[in-house]
Image (spheres, helix red, strand yellow):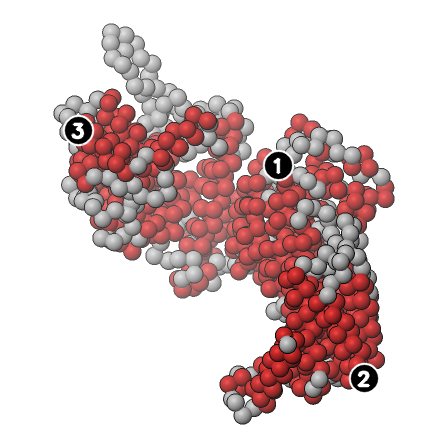
Amino acid sequence: MFTAGAEGLLHQARGIQDEELQKFCSRVVKLLQKEELGPDAVDALQRLFLIVSATKYKRKLEKTCVDLLQTTLCAPKCPEQLQLLCTAILRERSPSDDLNLSCDHVQNSRQLSLVASVLLAQGDKKEEVRSVGQRAFRVLESRQPEGPSLRHLLPVVSKVTHLAPHTLHEDQTNLLSKRLVDWLRYASVQQGVPHTSGGFFSAPRARQPGPVTEVDGAVATDFFTVLSTGQHFTEDQWLNVQAFSMLRAWLLHSSPRGPSSPDTDDKSELEGSTLSVLSATSTASHLLPPQERLREKAFEYCQRLIEQSTRRALRKGDSDLQKACLVEAVLLLDVLCRQDPSFLYRTLSCLKALHARLCGDPARVRALLPIAQFFLNHGEAAAVDSEAILQHLFTRIPCELFHSPMLAFEFVCFCRDSLPVFGRNLDILRRSFPNLFKLLAWNSPALTSEFVALLPSLVDSGTAVEMLHALLDLPCLTAALDLQLRLSPAAAERPLWDVSLRNPSCLEASRDPQFQGLLQHLLRATASGTTERLAPLHQLLQPLASLTRVVQCAEAVPTLLQAFFSAVTQFADGALSNQLALLLLERSDSLYQVPQYEAHVHRVLSSQFLVLCARHPSLVVELAKELLEFVGSVSSVHSRETMLTAVVWAVGEYLSVSWDRRCTVEQINRFFEALEALLFEVTQSRPSATLPKCPPRVITVLMTTLTKLASRSQDLIPRVSLFLSKMRSLAQNPAPSSDRCGEDAGAVCTRAAELLTLLKMPSVAQFVLTPSAEVSEPRYHRDTNTALPLALRTVSRLVEKEAGLLLG
């Protein structure tokens, strides 16, 4: 991020010790005490600023040095560069208890802006925000609107308004509203006079300034705006630009009627009447109260900007400014219509025409978001259906512009922030989740937290299964999007991709018809209601699995899965839970092979499988066939350890008549035989490079589940007792070729001894290993007269006795 030279300077600054810093402060003090502050003082303050800003913690400066920094900042004749450096150093030390700055007697607006920036950085412990605001308005009141230095003041006023709007009085609010009207509507339309250095040939021969021009070079025939161009600008033109930049924030904070106030609601009832139409044109602008007059002029300003945005800019910088101003103009119109619905009918026709124009202009697609927001907010009041606008928005932008990071972030924020007003259009958002996932797949580091907040609103019972497939295939989608860009014919306009793979082998293979259907399904724009097995596509795109963007996306998936299941488990019924549980089993061995991806996803899937079982215990009985098939393969022990452990534990916990009356002895016996065979296989197989040793956690869970099943079908107790005895002997006397370490063998031996002891008393074993649902109630653990404490004491004595026999 920094050059080598800059990194070296930062490293030196961070390495300066407190003693060296105090010596340097003494030098700064001597320089600031001189009558003439020259280049040496500038150099010293630059070095001091580097030192205090290079670390995250606050560096301690001498009190004398801090006092002199404040004195220099407030000195009327101090050079501006020195004042800026003093301000920067004092801000870096904020908040500070030894600050004694005050803005009460500062007259110069530039100096006031610097002092205010330090005070506002302190927080509001001593009501600094109020004092700064009051002083700024007193300076504002004492000057005419065309004052030469007021533009230093507007950022201060804007900041105070944002931090503490309640500190402003009504007369101050009216004053600034009047000033803003003058700056917005009545700025000069002549260009400014260039600064001259004086001399013989300066003033007499200087050309008179001409009129300002439009972005296309034409002479401006209407009032000045931020999109007007010229060689030089007057003070009121600069104030016009600043006024526009703070206008939306000012309207939101200073309006006596907010967007949800009763006044607005009452007035909206008249929107369809003749009265609202007449009120838009009847009242003379200059007779309106200051706030309403400001709204009127802001509306005119926005209309002028929309007209200027149709012009073809001669410079790229002006074209970019057009796009930004167009977005801000639409956002301002939204605020104006919320505050005063009489603007609504004048705005609708304008924005409808603007939307039709922008749909054919890919360069200005960002402005479609605030337009959609406008119609979501006001479509019902104006009897305008926003469905077509939203359909176009959700279908086009993610498909074509997923690679634009700024647009992707703004699009997702639009979806998240508009949730309360989507209403019946929420189905459009939900059906469009495959398109939204393209934004997520390509920009996952920046958008993960936004999607965590958005997912609960995207998922419902109709899309849950398809969405879970899409989340698990998200890294594969990233690879497919990368492939799509590489195959794009418009090579000059393609965004950059990872150049570590210049010509992956899958480029030509992807044109094969057998892959086209799978790619189209993965890149679909809306929910299809169907799922496809994408294993062939995983193999095709495997050369792209190591790309940085794919790996970053894979790292985000576990977090997204957690958010998905947190939302789904709130409404999932038994049927949906069964579908999701089956999906987890199927997809646990069908994931895109990204480094570490499978292990991280398995941890989430296993934990969520247990959550589904806890909420709907009957799914173990209902999915008995599928669960038996899952545990029937020994290879799953090594490739799906966490998932297998969760399934085995769930079988032992919930395959019981106490959870589901449909559970039969035959089912228990079938599971017992399958798990017994699995345990025999994993304990008897010799570890090798291709078949590593079985983790002790899997072995102990298998033994525990077999014991639980035997306690429910007591004919199985002799078999499991014999098996546990063998396991204990095997753990105590491992074979010479065994790779099992002492700690692992000890864990297996201990668990086998505990389970054998329990099986000596079958009734106690059944009570402990298959407790009823009532055992979760607190009284079973607190009341010594209940059966549970007695059973636990009995089992403890038996276990202690057995342990003593083993030691003996």
Which SS class for mark 3? helix
- Mark 1: which amino acid? Pro
Depth check, front residue: 507 or 407: 507
Which dot marks residue 30? 3
Compared across the picture, whether 299 is left or right of 409 comes to left
- What residue is at 65 percent from the left and 34 percent from the top? 498
- Residue 533 image point, x, y percent: 80, 53
Name of the residue lying farthest toward the bottom: 785
Mark number for residue 715? 2
Q: Is residue 590 left or right of residue 457?
A: right
Tell me residue 108's x, y (percent).
Answer: 20, 35
Tag count in the figure? 3
Three-letter residue code for mark 2:
Asp
Q: Which residue is mark 1?
A: 362
Q: Which picture quadrant has residue 791? A: bottom right
**Residue 38 picture quarter:** top left
Judging from the image, what secondary structure is the residue with disc 2 in? helix
**Three-letter code for the amino acid on which mark 3 is drawn:** Lys
Label 3 vs 1, first from the N-terminus: 3
